[in-house]
Structure formats: structure tokens, C-alpha cells
Amino acid sequence: MRLEIKDLHVHYGKIEAIKGVSIVVNEGEIVTLIGANGAGKTTMLKTISGLRPVTSGQILFNGEDISKMPAFKRADLGLSQAPEGRGIFVGMTVLENLEMGKYNRKDRKKEMAEDLEKVYHLFPRLKERAFQAGGTLSGGEQQMLAIGRALMSRPKVLLLDEPSMGLAPLMIQNIFNIITEINKTGVTILLVEQNAQQALQRAHRAYVLEVGNVVKEAKASDLLNDPAVRAAYLGTGAH
Amino acid sequence: MANLKSSLNLRDKGAEYWERSPKWRRVALAIFFIAICYALPFLNNPLVNTPGSDFQSVLFYPVGMYVLMAIGLNIVVGKSGLLDLGYVAFFAIGAYTMAILGTKTSLNFWEILPIGVGLAMLSGVLLGTPTLRLRGDYLAIVTLGFGEIVRIFAVNTDAIGGSRGIAGIPTPPDVFNAKFTILDPKPYYWMLLTFTLLIIWMVRRMAARRPGRAWDAIRQDDDVAQLMGINTRKYKVWAFVLGAAVAGVGGVVYASQILSIVPDQFNLNISILILACVVFGGIGNVWGVILGAVLLAFTPERIRFLSQPRILVFGIALVVMMNLRPDGILPKKKREHFDPDWHTVEESGEGEIK
């Protein structure tokens, strides 16, 4: 499953948030979009998953242009997003949240037990908390739940929006380990992050986004050593 | 205070008792309560009598009617989280359908009922499809406008009586031995009660299945619901349309009892009062909503002997209650733990909206 975005423009009212971005995510890759606040990272993901309309440009999912398709249909194609700010259903239990991830799967009854087992294997904490309301979980647990729920739909491409946001360092490490593990099971991942250090260590390739434009595209390991990137995003450029 | 609060926790105690009860006891209790509801018109107790108005009439309107409409509005506001301030419009459309077709054609009540419900649903689709893109306050303003437009349209259209409304609406034909006449509100009450029970049953079945879960997700987070693959617009329009259908039933029945209607009966106050019933009773919980509607409809009648200041007293009582129980009298159960009853969604695809 290849995800390709061609010359994407997105507006909020008159303000152009995405100004002609083109990116490619090849099958099996982890690709990361890094950038400062307001660079348009979250807008990119929302547009790819269909929550924001495109002004112009194409979103090709396995060659098919899905830029006009409503969000709920994109979910059926195998495009799954763990939203920013751990958008979980706080009034539902952990298990119910996970079940929601399967809402539209035709074979949800058959798949349910197997996929729950997979998610619980990745996140044993969720199994312990299965019957607890989502709103009572800690930040890290909510993030696990958001990712676990996205996995329940058996995604081909997983979109992750700032999975490290607001988490303790140890938890960040933990979440990124799991992201790598998910990728090894064959899920293509597009990762949006402010924590450039972690994201660049885990990703295969990376794009640097600045005020709605891609200013740099390279192998993630190269960007880690790029002085300009280090100065701007890794906070170590002065040395 | 804490003690008082936990002893007042009717919701959880009632639910617990119900969940622990074996099936035969549930059936027996249900039959018992339904029988009481049907027997209510014969109740003659100084506590519940309504000096100044006929108790049996009060049972039909406002009590029964408010209960029915509050259950309908609860689908929209309580289940799917859409704030509709123009709910009275659907009630008016049902009532006007009954009035126009009843006076101008030879159709009887039972033939007009499905037409009235159908027209209310159709107007729900027409209003809902374009406006349900809006969220929260914006939706509230648009629906409020719709409610007013329907009323003002009726006032200014001479073909449907203008501000004088329509008189001489026929009563429903007899059912078994029950005669529907202006003098006897009991058959109307029983009919309304029957419709209400059917609607409760229907709503509860839907809420326990996929539509219910979709509404739940939409209410909690519309965007995330879409990411789960839920066609949120479809389910929102459906919630709207089902709510409209219930109000349509109410309108047709109401018109056939009151025999003459004028546009000003369908004013904004009704929408607000029905919404108050839902919020006051406990948003999202059908039993709370029913209790809220009963209290809000009944109290002003009960204290009618106070004449003018009664609405003031009523208002003060509302403010005090909402401070004591901000989630309503019987709020929806806070689901911190697992509720096995609710967990039937994945076992059956029944009740799915296509």
C-alpha cells in the first residue's frame, strides 16, 4: 500500500495551511513528518484521513485518488488514524473503545477475539484496564488505547499524530518501541512528531515541514546528522 | 451531605436492583408499572389532584404529551448530542397534517397518522441534511430558526387558517369500546400511552445496537467517530428524523384531541420546555427523561391554585433542582465499569440503519 500526496493545498477559511505539499510513503516504511508548531503537520494528517477538505491536489492511496472521499469510507480502505490529543471515547470502556475500532469491519465478529489478543499483546496494560472507562486512564494509557483502537481495523497504513505528546520520557520510549514493532508486522506508518529525535531514530525517511511547505526530504538517519535540522528541531545545533 | 447524596442515588440503586433481578421479576415489574400507568386516570388522590384543571385532561396534555416528546427529543439531544431548539416544528407539522387532512378530506385519524409522521420525518430530512454539518451552538440557532419559521409560516398562510388556525378537527374513530370525544380524555391518554410504550421499546432496542453505539461515539467526538468508519452524517440525520417522527405522532394525536389548533400553540416555549424535561430528568437516560417530563408538566398544573405566581414558583424549583442535581434527577449511569447489558452490539447486526 503506497500513499502518495501530490501538490496538496489546504485552507482554513482564507488562510492557506498547506501550500503544495508532495510526499510519498512506500509500503512497509515508517515516514515521519517533523516540524514546529503550526507547520501544518496535524492538518496534513487530518486531510489525509478526510477530516479536512482539500483545496486542490491529490491523495493517492494505492494509486486511487481518495481526496474527495468522505472520512468514514477512507477508514474502510485500510487508512487508520490515531488522532492527536489521544482522541478516545472517554465515556466508553477500554474494550468498547477497541470495539469501536472495528465498527465497520464486515467480519468483526470473527476477527474480534484474535485482534483483541494482538492489541493486548502489544499493550498488556489495556487488558488490565479493559473494563475501565477511557477517561480514567493515564495519558500514556490513553495513547496506547488510541493506537490499539486504530490497529483493530487492521490498517494497511497507520497515521499517528504526535503519539509522544504530553508523555513521560519512559512512556515515550515505550510507545516508540511499539510503533517500531507494529511496523515490523507489515503496517506502513506515517508519523507526525514534534519529538524529532525519537521520530528520526525510528523512521526510514523524513520530511521537514515549515509553514505549510516541505523544506527538506531525506533519509531519517541523514537528517539526524544534518546541522540545520539539529539546530532547528533537535536543540543541539549550537555545539 | 455525602450520606444524603448516596442515599439519593436512585439511578444506581434502581439499575442494580433491575440487573440483579431474574427475568420473571423483570417481566412482573414491567407489567405492574405499565398497568399502573394505564390505571392512572382513575387515581383520585388529593396529593396528585390538580385543582383548577381536570386531572384526566392533565394526564393527556401536558403530562403524556411532554413525556412522548421528551423521549423523542432525547434521541436527538441525549443520544446523539445534537442541540435541537426547534423541536416544536415537527409537533406542529404533525398537528397541522391532522388538522388539514381531517377537515378537508375524508381520511380518518388512523389513515392520517402515518402521513403526519411521514411528513414530520421528511421535514426532518430536509432540515437535517443541510444543517447537520453545523455543530453545537450553530446547530441550535438554525433549528431555533426553523421552529419559528414553521410557526410564522402557519400564521401568514391563509389557506391553512392563518393566525386563526383550524377548527373542527375530527376525533379518531372508536377503537373497541373506547369512544374518542372531547368530553372524555381517557381514551386519548391510553392511546398516547400505548404509542409512548412502543416508542420506548423501539428506542431502547436501537440504543443497544449499532446505531446506539454510533450515536454514542458521535456525541463524544464527531471527528473520531468518522475515523472509526462511522458515517456520522447518516446517523445524525437518522437521529433527527426519528426524533421528528415521535413529535409527529404527538402532533397528530394532540390535534385530534384538542379539535382546533392555532399557530401560537406551537411557539418556542414548547421547544424549550421539552428540552428542559430532557435536561432536568437526566440527559440520555430514558427513565430520567420520563420522570423529568412528568414533573415539569405536572407541577405547574398541581400548583395552579397559586394562579399568577405559579410559574415563578416553578422556575425557582427548577433552579434549585438543577443546583442540587446538575446532571438531572436520574442521570445516565456513569459507566466507569463494564456494563454487560450494553455489550450486545457485536453479537447482532440487527437494527442496523442502512
Image (cartoon, coloured by chain):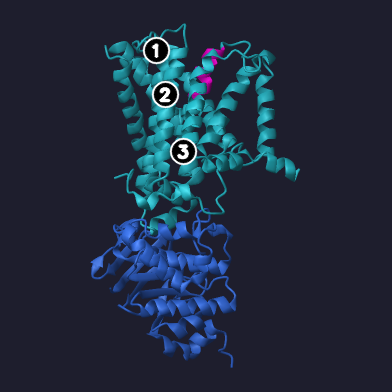
Chain colours: A blue, B cyan
Which label lies toward us, 3 or 2? 3
Residue in view at x 48 percent, y 20 percent: B38
Q: Which numbered disc flags the more N-terminal residue, 1 or 2?
A: 1
Q: Position of residue B236 (x, y in %)?
A: 39, 44
Whether residue B312 is visible to the viewer of this picture, yes or no, is: yes
Q: Is residue B263 above or below residue A193?
A: above
Look at mark 1 in the image and give the residue it sits on: B166
Q: Is residue B107 above or below residue A227?
A: above
Q: Which amino acid type is marked by label 3?
A: Lys
Q: Tell me the element at label 3.
A: helix
Of B301 and B174, the residue lying toward us? B174
Look at mark 3 in the image and give the residue it sits on: B23
Of B126 and B283, the residue lying toward us? B283
How far, Cα to Cα, is label 3 from label 1?
49 Å
Q: Which amino acid type is marked by label 1?
A: Ile
Q: How crowded is mark 3: few (under 14 residues within 10 Å), some or many (20 or more)?
A: few
Residue in view at x 52 percent, y 20 percent: B62
Residue in view at x 23 percent, y 70 percent: A63
- Magenta residues, dominant SS class: helix
Mark 3 and mark 2 on one chain: yes
Q: Tell me the element at label 2.
A: helix
Q: In this view, does A16 lie to the left or right of A37?
A: left
Residue B63 in magenta stretch: yes
